[in-house]
Image (spheres, rainbow, N blue to C red):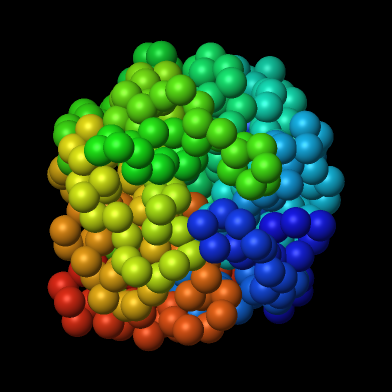
């Protein structure tokens, strides 16, 4: 198998360093870019997300990437806000998103024992099987940091629970996305990234 | 941390070198730590910023979240720390000097990466907040009461509170359960207990009796008196949910 050429779409947020380092630990030098040609020809594409939905959608639009992303056929992974952007909309500033998955990201209701943002290690349980989860125990812990989430939909591959079940991993065709941060989720997270990179373009 | 080495004192004094940053960080990840906190204790008292290139080296090897504390006084400081790869910034003395900094940082970077460290000391039947605790000669009472400050920092957008119970620090006699229970009752963001862990039972006590979200310890881990994996197995046996 040839070495993957990974494009990380630059959504403008800080803290991309941890993702790049996680890929480097797997022997992958990823390119942080908004260049359409680089993204189109990459073997794997990652859309990370730190920041606000509206701001990120505006940046993607300005870079001319909205239709391009929807048309990609290679393995694609959204992370955190990157998951939410793949759905139709987010309640965060009522933002229209990419619409690859049906559904809307909604804000968590804060409760005395459930602060928002939801932050920390949570168990993730699979709803169905996928090569993305090869070698990862059902109920493994992953690290979450988020205020918005998508409920369980037809595209939900795995769920976590914060007051109610929500989509921890979504998957449809070549598009996958995690609400948690695999790059900060220890060995289980590294395995998920490795499984993603093992997919054939 | 001081000058690139990991140091630890007793009740915030008499710091001894415990090892190299990378060596300890790597060991803790292998043992199964859920998160690491790096304190540069020399930063605030000297009135200077820290050389932050080490954050980048730490971020390269860590596959768990970590926060950095020490000398973060501005949006620019915070941005540098986050860009080097830290997941969270932890503010202590500068937040006491300028509470509005918490609001600004939370708006700019999100509450999820703004941690407030509180050094709290029991004084005459109440708890009070201390500042500049990295240097015994400069440590002083901040004029604030701990429970009031806990409420204020949440109102200003803090996403997490680390409560360092100074009376207990480094003496391994157990966490200050009474103080932590009082703070827990007023704290709706994640609360991390710090100061006093000496045995595995101390960790079980603080999770079960004070309902904190995390237990922070330094001395017992640095000295290898407690292995983190063995601790987590012990906690699971005590019905505390842990990641193993």
Residue at point 68% right, 69% down? B16
Lateral position of residue B83 relative to residue B185, left or right: right
Answer above or below: position of A26 versus B120: below
Q: Position of residue A111 (x, y in %)?
A: 17, 33
Answer above or below: position of A59 versus A22: above
Residue at point 36% right, 53% down? B193
Q: Nearer the viewer, residue A66 or A187?
A: A187
Residue B45 is at least partly visible in this image: yes
Residue at point 71% right, 37% down? B45
Q: Please state, as top left, top right, bottom left or bottom right, where the N terminus of chain A lies in the image.
A: bottom right
Q: Position of residue B231 (x, y in %)?
A: 35, 79
Q: Residue furthest front?
A: B124
Q: Position of residue A165 (x, y in %)?
A: 19, 48
Lateral position of residue A12 relative to residue B235, left or right: right
Residue A39 is at least partly visible in this image: no
Q: Nearer the viewer, residue B108 or B71?
A: B71
Q: Quadrant of residue B105?
A: top right
Lateral position of residue A108 relative to residue B228, left or right: left
Lateral position of residue A4 relative to residue A176, left or right: right
Residue at point 60% right, 78% down? B27
Q: Position of residue B169 (x, y in %)?
A: 46, 59
Q: Please state, as top left, top right, bottom left or bottom right, where the C terminus of chain A lies in the image.
A: bottom right
Q: Nearer the viewer, residue B120 or B103?
A: B120
How many marks overall? 0
């Amino acid at each position: 198998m040839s070495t993957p050429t990974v494009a990380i779409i630059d959504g403008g947020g800080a803290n991309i360093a941890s993702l790049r380092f996680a890929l480097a630990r797997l022997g992958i030098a990823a390119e942080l870019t908004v260049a359409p040609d680089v993204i189109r020809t990459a073997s794997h594409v990652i859309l990370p997300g730190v920041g606000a939905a509206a701001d990120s959608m505006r940046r993607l639009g300005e870079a001319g990437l909205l239709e391009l992303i929807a048309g990609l056929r290679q393995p694609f992974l959204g992370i955190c806000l990157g998951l939410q952007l793949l759905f139709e909309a987010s309640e965060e500033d009522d933002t229209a998103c990419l619409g690859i998955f049906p559904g809307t990201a909604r804000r968590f209701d804060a409760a005395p024992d459930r602060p928002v943002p939801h932050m920390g290690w949570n168990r993730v349980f699979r709803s169905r099987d996928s090569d993305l989860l090869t070698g990862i125990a059902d109920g493994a812990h992953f690290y979450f940091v988020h205020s918005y989430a998508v409920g369980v939909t037809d595209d939900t591959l795995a769920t976590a629970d914060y007051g109610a079940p929500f989509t921890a991993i979504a998957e449809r065709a070549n598009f996958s996305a995690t609400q948690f941060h695999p790059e900060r989720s220890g060995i289980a997270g590294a395995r998920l990234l490795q499984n993603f990179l093992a997919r054939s373009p | 941390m001081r000058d690139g080495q990991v140091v630890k004192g007793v009740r915030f004094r008499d710091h001894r070198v415990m090892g190299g940053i990378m060596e300890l960080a790597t060991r803790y990840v292998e043992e199964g730590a859920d998160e690491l906190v790096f304190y540069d204790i020399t930063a605030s008292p000297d009135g200077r910023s820290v050389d932050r290139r080490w954050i980048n080296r730490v971020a390269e090897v860590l596959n768990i979240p970590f926060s950095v504390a020490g000398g973060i006084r501005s949006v620019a400081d915070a941005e540098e720390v986050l860009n080097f790869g830290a997941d969270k910034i932890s503010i202590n003395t500068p937040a006491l000097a300028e509470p509005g900094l918490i609001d600004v940082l939370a708006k700019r970077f999100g509450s999820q990466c703004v941690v407030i460290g509180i050094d709290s000391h029991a004084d005459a039947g109440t708890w009070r907040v201390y500042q500049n605790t990295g240097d015994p000669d400069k440590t002083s009472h901040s004029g604030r009461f701990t429970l009031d400050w806990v409420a204020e920092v949440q109102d200003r957008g803090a996403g997490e509170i680390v409560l360092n119970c100074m009376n207990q620090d480094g003496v391994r006699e157990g966490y200050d359960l009474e103080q932590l229970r009082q703070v827990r009752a007023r704290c709706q963001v994640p609360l991390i207990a710090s100061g006093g862990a000496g045995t595995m039972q101390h960790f079980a006590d603080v999770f079960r009796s004070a309902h904190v979200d995390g237990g922070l310890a330094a001395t017992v881990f640095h000295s290898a008196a407690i292995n983190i994996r063995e601790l987590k197995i012990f906690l699971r046996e005590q019905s505390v949910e842990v990641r193993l």
